[in-house]
Image (cartoon, coloured by chain):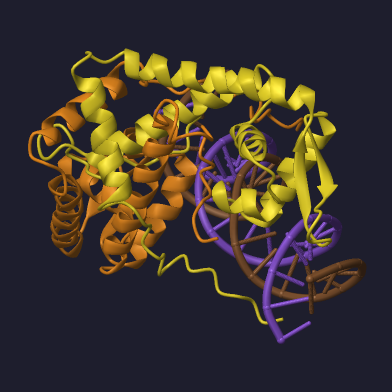
Chain colours: A yellow, B orange, C purple, D brown
Amino acid sequence: MTSLAPARTAGTAERTAPDLSYLLDHTSHVLRTKMAAALAEVGMTARMHCVLVKALEEERTQIQIAELGDMDKTTMVVTVDALEKAGLAERRPSAGDRRARVIAVTDAGAEMAERTQAIVDRVHAEAIGSLPEEMRPVLLAALELLTTGHLATPEESPAGARRARQA
Amino acid sequence: MTSLAPARTAGTAERTAPDLSYLLDHTSHVLRTKMAAALAEVGMTARMHCVLVKALEEERTQIQIAELGDMDKTTMVVTVDALEKAGLAERRPSAGDRRARVIAVTDAGAEMAERTQAIVDRVHAEAIGSLPEEMRPVLLAALELLTTGHLATPEESPAGARRARQA
DNA sequence: TATTGTTATACTCTATAACTATA
DNA sequence: TATAGTTATAGAGTATAACAATA
């Protein structure tokens, strides 16, 4: 099996209530693979793209970008490493706080960000464009309502709670 | 950070095109945590529920259920182990093929499947019910169109392609 | 004392490999 | 030879822990 095996939640999807879990998992997963493939053609990942864009918007430190992108600071380290290695961004000492590093996007990085933003927009447009025109704004509005409303914040995982190990 | 860090794909979500990747990732992720939490209250996971339901529909072997649920056969082993340990299902030799094991759902398992199906339906209904009534069928129809159309099959991962190791 | 960024490490999840027994 | 199921293990991804420099 190639996919991440999302395990259709409701077994009797056809007969009973439509399986929202399956629909969201599947579309989200497939779109992610399409996005990853499209970005991989220019040697980029979604996370690298995200960091470039946030860093271009204004002067930001690693932690600030990590929070915006909802990633761990250790994940940021790896992502910034990749960007530096590709010559797309650089770590610079922050003027105000000598502990912090500002992410400076190089000229090549700014060019890349434009390319990848175009790729992202294209992949999204292709997906949405495959739907009848009347449906498009409703789909987006509904997802936005869920995102800011009933499905705004994840449930704290009680089972998978990762306890701190005894040091 | 507690979440799986989906990395908003488009950085300028507010100003430019709506970020379909973010919307799908976020809703899918949060719904999954809600579902996991709800099922955890009766000691179940989405995968266990899925296997129970498939096994109840008709006599099926592990591999058959694995394919229906889009999981690896090794993942099936773990899931069936959990179901057996909980007394909800049993492995029985297949009548026709002595290599295969049929998953037999116990009475307790059948009861549990009803409970978990009610939980699944409730969680879905709560999410969809949070939307204005006109939007609900459109959202579901749009997701179904994507699932069977443009976003039907995952892109083969070129970067993350897991090559077979040399034996 | 708290925080930024770093390194090292451990955990979770899932897939691959190799094996047994059947076919 | 191929397949069902099992076990063991490897890999990717991501979090926690501990540390150095600075606040």
Closer to the camera in the image, B47 or D12 = D12
Q: In this view, does A135 lie to the left or right of A78?
A: left
Q: Quadrant of the C terminus of chain B?
A: top right
Determine the image quadrant of residue B65: top left
Q: Is residue B113 left or right of residue D6?
A: left
Work out which residue is located at the far front of the displayed protein and give it: A96
Determine the image quadrant of residue A74: bottom right
Q: In this view, does B28 lie above or below A86?
A: below
Q: Position of residue D18 (x, y in %)?
A: 80, 76
Residue B32 visible: yes
Q: Is residue A109 left or right of residue A126?
A: right
Q: Is residue A128 above or below residue B138?
A: above
- Write the residue at 51% across / 51% down: B4
Residue A1 visible: no
- Write the residue at 66% across / 82% down: A166
Closer to the camera in the image, B122 or A119 = A119
- Write the residue at 71% across / 51% down: A61
Q: Where is residue B154 in the image (x, y as percent from the top left)?
A: 45, 23
Q: Where is residue A34 in the image (x, y as percent from the top left)?
A: 50, 22
Q: In which quarter of the image is the N terminus of chain B?
A: bottom right
- Write the residue at 73% across / 32% down: B165
Closer to the camera in the image, A158 or A145 = A145
Q: Is residue B38 above or below residue A139?
A: below
Q: Is residue B157 above or below residue A13?
A: above
Q: In this view, does D20 lie to the left or right of A87?
A: right
